[in-house]
Image (tube, rainbow, N blue to C red):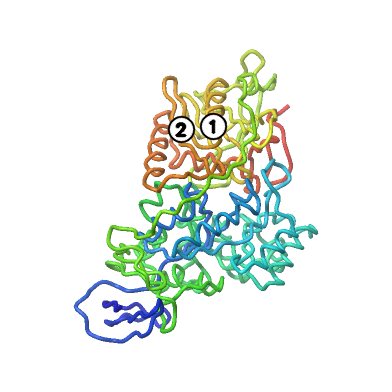
Amino acid sequence: MKLKGNIIDIPNGKIFKGEVTIENGKIKSIEEKESEENHFILPGFIDAHIHIESTMLVPSEFAKIAVKHGTVATVSDPHEIANVLGVKGVEFMIENGKQTPFKFNFGAPSCVPATSFESAGAEIDSDAIKTLMANPDIKYLAEMMNYPGVIYDDAEVLKKLKWAKHYNKPIDGHAPGLLGEDLNKYISAGISTDHECFTYDEGLEKLQKGMKVIIREGSAAKNFEALIGLLDEHFLNMMFCSDDKHPDDLLLGHINQLCARAVAKGVDVFKVLRAACVNPVKHYNLDVGLLNVGDDADCIIVEDLNDFKTLQTYINGALVFDKRESKIEHVEFENLNNFNTDKKEISDFRLESQAEKIRVIECKDGELVTNELIENATIEDGNLISNTKTDILKMAVVNRYENQKPAIGFIKNIGLKEGAIASSVGHDSHNIIAVGVSDEAICKAVNLLIENEGGICAISDNEEKVVALPMAGIMSDQNAETIGRQYAELDKMAKQLGSKLHAPYMSLSFMALLVIPSLKLSDKGLFDGGKFKFTSVEVL
């Protein structure tokens, strides 16, 4: 098989007319040769850090869509399903992904549970990490979110890092806002990347100290604008990722969108493609071709170098996407789950108080970090309640693994004027998170998800919608088009209820992410991420 067109030689910064010959899945030759074809041939795109689960798709369904955008491989942390199902969940992701030609590269989740301040469905200790790191299907130790454990020499954390080093596999970082001497200690432990930088200065310091910085642009966390100015000078040590991407966004684009935005900002196209195609392969030692003779034929044909519209995608020489058609086949699989809580009563969501002031989570659109606000309390019959006029709404996190009393907090900027929204996609332990204008609405939304053993939903005064997620309570058993359409309808309903957030459900899912400052809510209570300890809703 021969591919003809404008060939992109990324290392040498060169474009030439030519012909790529593919034989037995490998690139046999690359020759300069006149061609009438005006499209461009280049290595496939790689998402350098993604949780496949956040697309609400199993790997095989994710692959169908990703190849449409020229993505041929991912560096994937199965942390989300591991928090629900443990090693069994990691094994499901690997085996399901193997049934497609797509090149998934899974890591060993380093923080399951992410903290001791929440209830998860499983635990992966250092002994399990040892076993996983010995597995050739595990390519790296996934994001070490417990940066306090690294800095203060937690014995279990250090054992996990030791096993990654023993098997000579990279260690991914996760340290938002970490700078100075603490950052030095974190890096010296062998941690080599970070996708959590949210300011230019933070990204620059980490690059200067030898880390690889991954520019993240997901459905909720968007750091492209803050970090893209670093790429021109530091292109050899930067990559692109989505981290968490909802299905409706995935249908529209993937890493190709970040390439287009970077080029539009005037960044040299070869530097952009270094970050998008080459650097992940080099850093993670991926078995992915880079359009060299002898490489696996993992390459794409794009219409131009501005929009990067993908015309064809090849993996190991097989045509997996052609114009508008994905050629990756459907894979049958069995739903696995871990959902063991009973339906709740409205009284479970009461928070008895006489406090005049309360701590409130300030949700920031497009960011995972939150602020802590001190606001006036609204009390009715001795119960702290939502106030739609001030947009301070009651929030609950419900343990889905056993029967426990819901944890209650308050949040600003969700914006609901009616009803409630809820999700069992709640990073990282995936308990049920709900926000609503009344205890009744919150209870109704929570119970709808318990009935479905997982999903996302919206409740109004006269309507309810739910998208069931029967695979571990975080993924669908449907295809991307179906789940994308259902999710888009639910997103629309949340906004009709008053939310002004770009991605209400993605933002909601991170309000229980304790490892990101500053104020979050777990199933055990309100948590101060700056001090790394629980705090009270009431300000007395």
Give the SS element for disc 2.
Answer: strand
Residue 98, given in percent of the width and then of the height, sits at 50, 62
Residue 48, given in percent of the width and then of the height, sits at 51, 63
Vertical relation: 144 (above or below) 468? below
Pick the residue in front: 14 or 199.
14
Residue found at the far left of this picture: 36
Residues under numbered marks 1 and 2 in contact, where contact means CB atoms less than 8 Å apart: yes
Circle count: 2
Quarter placement of the C terminus: top right
Mark on residue 19?
none
Give the SS element for disc 1.
Answer: helix
**How far apart, in angstroms, are the residues tagged by discs 1 and 2?**
8 Å
In the rendered image, which residue does mark 1 sit on? 449
**Residue type, mark 2 in image:** Val
Vertical relation: 538 (above or below) 472? above
> If you read the primary sequence from the N terminus, does the residue marked by circle 1 or circle 2 appear first?
1
- Would you call the spot at circle 2 few (<14 residues within 10 Å), some (14-19), or many (20 or more)? many
Residue 311, given in percent of the width and then of the height, sits at 29, 64
- Would you call the spot at circle 1 few (<14 residues within 10 Å), some (14-19), or many (20 or more)? many
Which residue occupies 55% across, 74% down?
285
Which residue occupies 79% across, 60% down?
153
Quarter occupied by residue 108? bottom right
Residue 213, given in percent of the width and then of the height, sits at 55, 65
Mark on residue 466?
2
Vertical relation: 284 (above or below) 51? below
**Residue type, mark 1 in image:** Leu
Which residue occupies 35% across, 52% down?
252
Q: Is residue 126 left or right of residue 23?
A: right
Quarter occupied by residue 463? top left
